[in-house]
Image: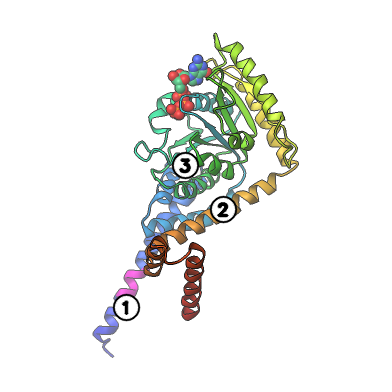
Amino acid sequence: MVPSDASKENSRKHLVSALRKHLLRDEWMEVAEELLKGNRSALSQAITWSESTLDKHRIFTQKIIEKVLPHTGRSFRLGMTGVPGVGKSTLIEALGIRWIEKGHRVAVLAIDPSSPITGGSILGDKTRMETLSMSSDAFIRPSASSNELGGVAAHTHEAILLCEAAGFDRIIVETVGVGQSETAVHHMTDCFLLLMLAGAGDQLQGIKRGIMEMCDLLAITKADGDNQNKAKLARAEYENALHLFPERPDAWIPPVVTLSALQKSGIDHLIEELERFENWSKSRLWNDRRSKQLTWQFETEWLRQLKIKMSKNAAFQELEHKILAQEIGVSEAVQLMLCSWIIDADKTT
Ligand SMILES: Nc1nc2c(ncn2[C@@H]2O[C@H](COP(=O)(O)OP(=O)(O)OP(=O)(O)O)[C@@H](O)[C@H]2O)c(=O)[nH]1
Ligand SMILES: [Mg+2]
């Protein structure tokens, strides 16, 4: 029997779709396999896909993450923050090199929603991390440009997992100390390091209490030359301030160290304190903190995706207008929205 035109067309479509699936599969699979071998180009490619808004790339990312997930989680995730110019990049260079000398592999990620134009503070900064960026045991990546913190947070979380799968066991997540991004970094790391300058005006006034409460370790930077004495004084002052905070659930008292990244002094002491914290944490609330990281990520991500979906929804826009026209209260509007949503979901099941 001669096949009809319709059935020929069907089998052609079937073949094309099977071939496309095969090619797509090969593309992400190859990157995932290379990434697991520690290939930095594959890691870069995977992170680029994870930052893309194309559906195809989202699918690639989900597939890759699913494949590499069993190989993640075995790193020390260090969050680092401090005002512009405090010395973050210079410290990352010194700390990263020292860690590599000790046999680690170091990944540096930036989270900086405040500068969508420069794409994160790291971009213009690679010159301050010249030696580190040339090492084959280092990987440096600026954050995706985005105005929106939730988006950057999601990308950074995925980037952390991908770096871990590629064998990086020391991950530094850097942020400029401007508002919300510290909270995001705190939520996605095991240890939060706050960098402070000595003698920068009225010392304790300038820092938000919230950030000091979040930090696990505080470092006074640029403790060299004439600045050494000021740095010592500042250390005593911050130690006192930190003692006044309520006791933490893990009973850890954040230590204050002084260092000079330029002269490479105090770096080993910082590493010792980081290791002391890691050990302390591992014998106490490590798993709890990791679970909280995932819960926070889950909540942030579903809210973000929900917001994107809702902003295109006609009923949502109508309710928003009614709220602005003061025809309806916010709480009632949300309730109506959820009700119509549940009814819609029921209809489709
Ligand atoms: N004296 C001294 N200067 C330092 C030290 N660390 C950094 N600097 C200088 O401080 C300036 C700022 O250093 P960065 O490392 O770029 O600071 P940053 O925090 O990364 O700055 P942003 O990327 O703008 O947020 C540079 O001129 C550095 O050379 C240090 O340990 N001692
Ligand atoms: Mg910098």
Between 277 and 180, the one lying in front of the other is 180
Quadrant in the rendering for residue 283: top right
Secondary element at tag 2: helix
**What residue does disc 3 label?**
39
Residue 191 vertical position relative to residue 308 in the rendered view, above or below:
above
Identify the coloring: rainbow
Q: Amino acid at mark 1?
A: Ser
Magenta-highlighted residues: 13-18
Residue lying at 46% horizontally and 61% vertically, measured from the top left: 306
N-terminal label among 1 and 2: 1
Secondary element at tag 1: helix
**What residue does disc 1 label?**
11
N-terminal label among 2 and 3: 3
Between 173 and 182, the one lying in front of the other is 182
Quadrant in the rendering for residue 240: top right
- 217 with respect to 2 (left or right): right
As drawn, the label of residue 250 is: none
Q: Amino acid at mark 2?
A: Leu
N-terminal label among 3 and 1: 1
| Disc 1 Cβ-to-ligand 2 distance below 8 Å | no
How far, Cα to Cα, is label 3 from label 1?
A: 39 Å
As drawn, the label of residue 69 is: 2
Residue reaching furthest left?
5
- Point out residue 58 in the picture as x, y percentages from the top left corner: 42, 57
Between 203 and 218, the one lying in front of the other is 203
Check disc 1: other Cα within 10 Å, few if <14, some if 14-19, many if 20+.
few
Observer able to see residue 153 = yes
Secondary element at tag 3: loop
Residue 193 vertical position relative to residue 162 in the rendered view, above or below:
above
Check disc 3: other Cα within 10 Å, few if <14, some if 14-19, many if 20+.
some
